[in-house]
Image (cartoon, grey):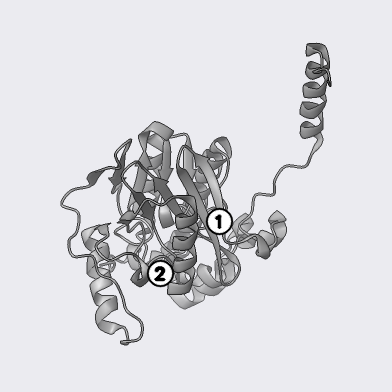
């Protein structure tokens, strides 16, 4: 029989592991899988978050993640945000079925954008949707404009207040509207017993602020409300899922990116620089190296100009 290691030997081994961990390089803080050191073959992947809660990271073009949240309760499964195509969402559904035989019963529309909703046609018939009125109206417009071959799922009803509670049997979760941000109908999923908040596209981890349908200054206030909640773990809609402590640091960093981008555009606006010239002059500083900066920078300039001119819907 092999003798178990002595307590002193275990203590020495633990100390060595701690010492080794301290010498390892920190995980790069980036939305780029290549820089982060995660091969594209690793996706899609489930990220266990504890006690029946999973993040789901899938790659979308041009090569960063779209994140969904999966909560397995006693009475069924809840999904917050889907993926960008029927095939991608079907893969997620198949992964869920490998986790549990319980039915998928609830779906929260954190973002109404197509990279999160375009695959919803493969979800089970009869699923209960939770959606903000603004997002439901946008999905109605998308449905009217979509070709017959690209079906847009429009939930039958919208939330009647800024908070809705869903009972999964062994736990309750809260769907929260904390204010307009990336879409205007942004919803968050709060799991109180895990002190976890899925923020959908209100939190883009190391992705340049994407503002084509955003409310820039209101977005900052929405992030402030999220940070004020009794939450330890913040889950983004794009970028990587971080550990709890790093997730708060990165959400604060994202909030600072919003502030800096808005301030730069407002500086140009106040100087009377025409909007298209401002697109050329904008200096994003350290955020110029963030994912999608070249694509999203001009959009941010135009959107903040609309906000400053009082022309946002």
Q: Residue furthest front?
A: 1
Which secondary structure, mark 2? loop
Q: Which residue is mark 1?
A: 239
User: How far across and how far down the image is residue 114, in percent?
Assistant: 40, 71
Q: Quadrant of the N terminus?
A: top right
Is 48 situated above or below 39? above
User: How far across and how far down the image is residue 206, in percent?
Assistant: 57, 54
Label 2 or label 1, whichever lies nearer to me, is 1
Q: Residues within 10 Å of mark 2 (few under 14, many from 20)?
A: some
Which secondary structure, mark 1? loop
Residue 85 seen by the camera: no
Q: Which badge, 2 or 1, is on the more N-terminal residue?
A: 2
**Disc 2 from disc 1: Cα separation:** 18 Å
Which residue is pictured at 46% across the width and 52% down the height? Answer: 203
Q: Residues within 10 Å of mark 1 (few under 14, many from 20)?
A: many
266 or 68: nearer the eye?
68
Q: Quadrant of the C terminus?
A: bottom left
Q: Which mark is residue 212?
A: 2
Question: Would you say 178 lies left or right of 207 here?
Answer: left
48 or 38: nearer the eye?
48
205 or 169: nearer the eye?
169
Is 252 situated above or below 17? below
Q: Which mark is residue 217?
A: none
């Amino acid at each position: 029989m092999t003798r178990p290691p002595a307590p002193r030997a275990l203590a020495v081994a633990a100390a060595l592991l701690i010492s080794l961990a301290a010498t390892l390089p920190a995980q790069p803080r980036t939305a780029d899988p290549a820089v982060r050191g995660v091969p594209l073959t690793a996706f899609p992947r489930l990220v266990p978050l504890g006690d029946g809660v999973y993040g789901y990271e899938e790659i979308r073009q041009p090569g960063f993640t779209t994140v969904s949240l999966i909560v397995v309760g006693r009475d069924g499964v809840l999904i917050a945000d889907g993926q960008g195509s029927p095939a991608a969402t079907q893969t997620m559904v198949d992964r869920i079925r490998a986790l549990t035989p319980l039915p998928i019963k609830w779906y929260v529309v954190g973002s109404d954008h197509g990279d999160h909703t375009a695959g919803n046609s493969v979800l089970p018939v009869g699923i209960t949707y939770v959606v903000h009125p603004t997002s439901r109206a946008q999905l109605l417009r998308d449905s009217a404009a979509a070709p017959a071959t690209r079906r847009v799922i429009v939930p039958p009803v919208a939330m009647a207040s800024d908070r809705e509670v869903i009972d999964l049997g062994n736990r309750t979760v809260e769907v929260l509207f904390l204010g307009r941000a990336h879409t205007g109908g942004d919803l968050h999923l709060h799991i109180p017993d895990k002190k976890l908040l899925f923020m959908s596209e209100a939190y883009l981890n190391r992705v340049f602020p994407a503002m084509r349908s955003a409310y820039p200054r209101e977005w900052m206030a929405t992030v402030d409300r999220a940070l004020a909640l009794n939450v330890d773990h913040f889950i983004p809609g794009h970028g990587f899922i971080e550990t709890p402590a790093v997730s708060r640091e990165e959400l604060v960093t994202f909030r600072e990116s919003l502030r800096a981008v808005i301030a730069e555009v407002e500086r140009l606006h106040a100087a009377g620089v025409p909007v298209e010239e401002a697109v050329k002059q904008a200096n994003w500083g350290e955020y110029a190296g963030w994912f999608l900066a070249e694509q999203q920078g001009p959009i941010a300039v135009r959107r903040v100009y609309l906000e400053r001119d009082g022309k946002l819907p």
